[in-house]
Image: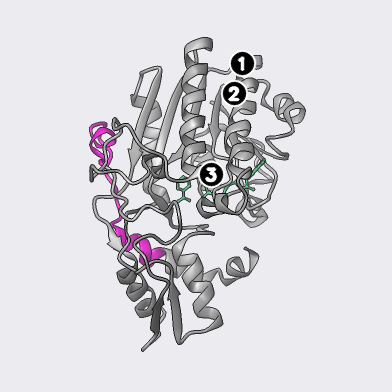
Amino acid sequence: MKTFVTGGAGFIASNLADALLKQGNEVIVYDNLSTGQEMFIEHNLANSKYTFIKGDVLDKELLHKKMQGCDTVFHFQANADVRGGMENTQIDLNQNIIGTHNVLEGMRIHGIKRIAFASSATVYGEPEEIPTPENISPVQTSIYGASKYSAEAIIQAYCEYFDIKSWIFRFVSFMGPRYSHGVIFDFMKKLNQNPSTLHILGDGSQRKSYLHVEDGINAILMAMEKAKEKTNIFNLGNREWINVTDLADILCETLSLKDVKYTFAGGVRGWKGDTPFVHLDIQKISSLGWKPKYSVEETIKMTIEYLKENQNLLEAR
Ligand SMILES: NC(=O)c1ccc[n+]([C@@H]2O[C@H](COP(=O)([O-])OP(=O)(O)OC[C@H]3O[C@@H](n4cnc5c(N)ncnc54)[C@H](O)[C@@H]3O)[C@@H](O)[C@H]2O)c1
């Protein structure tokens, strides 16, 4: 494959780019480095099968020029800050909906027929059905989730019009190497500043599932090989979940911090638009023969170890 990876300098898609190269594919990474990191891509810069382009998906002219000749798009660029939509109500529309439309237009212009899209468990809002299957009719509770759901819908329409195949992945939170935003990241930043107190958003009872990025990427690559519908939608998650207070306990224990006092902002949600219980039904992806290698607890511990060894990341964002 000659692949085009948007957001390929970010946490998840830089890992994906490595996996695609390992399989022998050509990889063009297109990223504006707004949250992506040079340290996630520099090991590939000398590889003749790898090209990095510093560019913005909102720069249609450059984007479309660089997409020419590719056969598969991995569209992972986004504003991945789920919380940001309250303060800036425009950002998800521009970055996640218009950005996706620009990528799809590039595909139409150049006749590119395959797209994998990084969607999110947030498209389910606060679902009544837990574990949540792919086929519920969700009510949106955040602009981020709504923008991902809209992007999915536009992708589906392009599949109908232009004979494109899509694989849409609704992820729980990913963790693992290059993890550079999310709950552990926030907690470790806070504990670096003050190791005796940890302020937790919500009441600490929010239950979430986490998936190791390696497991997620294996699922994505397997699904693209095996699932043959015009639009293929898959949940990607783990078998278990954990509540935020228990996660904080694992963090403090792994960092050897004793007697950390937790304070709670209160309420069942961490913020408006947060989902108090995220646990996805993974039967559909499992039926292809995939299963997660790492449990939620292992994933959390490995992520803490990674950040301990890469403290500079905590300062970078
Ligand atoms: N991290 C998670 O747990 C999670 C969960 C569900 C869905 N997702 C989705 O997965 C994808 C990757 O997330 P991530 O955690 O790796 O986030 P990330 O912020 O690390 O990666 C996003 C990348 O996109 C780039 N980017 C952002 N805006 C851009 C623009 N306008 N033009 C070009 N490049 C731009 C950034 O520089 C960054 O490298 C996103 O679409 C995100 O919404 C992530």
Tell me the tag on residue 108: 1
Quarter-of-image position of residue 262: bottom left
Give the spatial CA distance, label 3 vs label 1.
Answer: 23 Å
Tell me the tag on residue 104: 2
Residue at image location 34% in from the left, 62% down from the top: 268
**Disc 2 or 3, which lies upstream in sequence?**
3
The verdict on label 3 being within 8 Å of ligand 1 is yes
Circle 1 residues within 10 Å: few <14, some 14–19, many ≥20: some
Give the spatial CA distance, label 2 vs label 3.
Answer: 18 Å
The region drawn magenta spans 281-302
Using residue 184 as the reference point, say whether residue 63 is left or right of it. right
Query: Decide: marks 2, 1 in contact (CB < 8 A)?
Result: yes
Give, as a three-letter code, the residue at label 3.
Ala
Residue at image location 63% in from the left, 69% down from the top: 315
Measured as percent of width and height from the top left, residue 77 is found at: 58, 40
> Could you say which is closer to the camera, residue 306 or residue 195?
195
Circle 3 residues within 10 Å: few <14, some 14–19, many ≥20: many
